[in-house]
Image: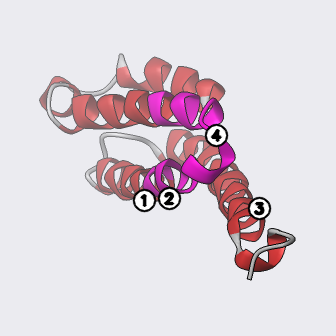
């Protein structure tokens, strides 16, 4: 997530002024919020991680849509959009794997001795 943000930040500084202070700022804030939620979830006990991880997945999907709007409005060129999209897709796969792992760990079948 950090490397995706650093890539974004370089693009953010070059956005047209109209989008830099509106949609660009919103995207920048979304990136920072995602980094914060991931950092918090990393240090939570296993049984408390599921909610923040699901929240992160939803916010990452929102971030993808906001970037698509920026690209469709021609404020972000196709090359830059593609570079960010590849990173966000990888992050999405990692978050999905993390969520699946947590579901398995927190399922009743994964808890021996419980009925």
First in sequence: mark 2 vs mark 3: 2
Horizontal and vertical percent position of residue 41: 56, 38
Q: Is residue 67 left or right of residue 54?
A: left
Disc 2 is placed on an element classified as helix
**C-alpha distance separating marks 1 and 2:** 6 Å
Q: Does residue 107 sit above or below 43 in this rendering?
A: below
Tags 2 and 3 touching, CB below 8 Å: no
Q: Which residue is identified by label 2?
A: 54
**C-alpha distance separating marks 1 and 3:** 17 Å
Tags 1 and 2 touching, CB below 8 Å: yes
User: Where is the C terminus found, in terms of image quarters?
Assistant: bottom right
Disc 3 is placed on an element classified as helix
First in sequence: mark 1 vs mark 4: 4
Horizontal and vertical percent position of residue 81: 50, 46
Residue at coordinates 30% horizontally, 40% vertically from top-left? 75
Q: Which residue is identified by label 1?
A: 58
First in sequence: mark 3 vs mark 4: 4
**C-alpha distance separating marks 2 and 3:** 12 Å
Q: Is residue 50 left or right of residue 31?
A: right
Q: Is residue 112 left or right of residue 78?
A: right
């Amino acid at each position: 997530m950090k490397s995706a943000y650093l890539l974004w930040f370089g693009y953010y500084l070059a956005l047209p002024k109209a989008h830099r202070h509106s949609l660009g700022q919103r995207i920048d804030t979304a990136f920072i919020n995602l980094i914060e939620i991931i950092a918090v979830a990393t240090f939570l006990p296993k049984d408390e991680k599921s909610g923040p991880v699901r929240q992160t997945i939803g916010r990452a999907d929102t971030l993808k849509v906001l970037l698509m709007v920026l690209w469709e409005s021609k404020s972000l060129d196709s090359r830059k959009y593609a570079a960010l999209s590849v990173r966000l897709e990888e992050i999405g796969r990692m978050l999905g794997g993390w969520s699946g792992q947590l579901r398995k760990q927190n399922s009743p079948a994964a808890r021996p001795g419980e009925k």
